[in-house]
Image (cartoon, rainbow, N blue to C red):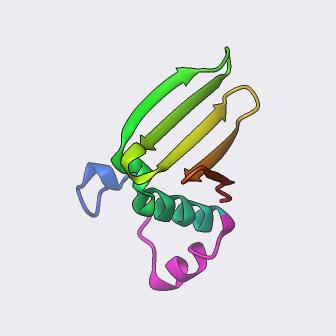
């Protein structure tokens, strides 16, 4: 902070190219990349969005693009901190693995 006088630098690390090369190999980073790719390529996200509680600790989020025949569903359990993502294309469902 003293060197840059920029308040947001307090908790910011500036990665070297070597650190970036290593960090992107981490499984958690690869999973995030896969999630971003899915979010950016599935036509489900061009449709309607809905949310509903499935119980006290479960939440279902659905994106549905009926015109394209595609939907994506996230079921998250806040109790055990798990989730599943399912994409359905023309009636065929597959779980998205991250």
- Whether residue 61 appears in this view of the structure is yes
Left/right placement of residue 13 relative to residue 30 reads left
- Whether residue 11 appears in this view of the structure is no
Q: Is residue 58 above or below residue 10?
A: above
Where are the magenta residues, as a range?
Answer: 13-27
User: What residue appears at the point 60 percent right and 26 percent down from the top-left corner?
Assistant: 59
- Horizontal and vertical percent position of residue 15: 45, 73
Q: Is residue 72 above or below residue 33?
A: above
Q: Tell which of 24 and 74 is nearer to you.
A: 74
Q: Quadrant of residue 22?
A: bottom right
Q: Quadrant of residue 96?
A: bottom right
User: What residue appears at the point 34 percent right and 49 percent down from the top-left corner?
Assistant: 46
User: What residue appears at the point 67 percent right and 28 percent down from the top-left corner?
Assistant: 78
Q: How many discs appear?
A: 0
Which image quarter holds the N terminus? bottom left
As drawn, the residue found furthest toward the top would be 56
Q: Tell which of 79 and 37 is nearer to you.
A: 37
As drawn, the residue found furthest toward the left would be 5
Q: Tell which of 18 and 78 is nearer to you.
A: 78
- Does 76 lie within the magenta span? no
Which image quarter holds the C terminus? bottom right
Q: Is residue 37 above or below residue 43?
A: below
User: What residue appears at the point 34 percent right and 56 percent down from the top-left corner?
Assistant: 9
- Horizontal and vertical percent position of residue 8: 31, 51
- Horizontal and vertical percent position of residue 88: 58, 50
- Does 15 lie within the magenta span? yes
Q: Is residue 51 above or below residue 8?
A: above
């Amino acid at each position: 902070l003293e060197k840059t006088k920029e308040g947001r630098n307090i908790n910011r690390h500036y990665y070297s190219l070597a650190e970036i090369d290593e960090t992107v190999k981490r499984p958690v980073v690869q999973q995030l990349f896969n999630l971003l790719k899915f979010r950016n390529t599935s036509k489900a996200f061009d449709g309607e969005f809905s949310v509903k509680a499935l119980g006290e600790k479960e939440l279902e989020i659905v994106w549905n693009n009926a015109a394209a025949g595609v939907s994506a569903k996230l079921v998250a359990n806040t109790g055990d901190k798990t989730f599943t993502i399912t994409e359905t294309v023309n009636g065929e469902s597959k779980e998205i693995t991250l």
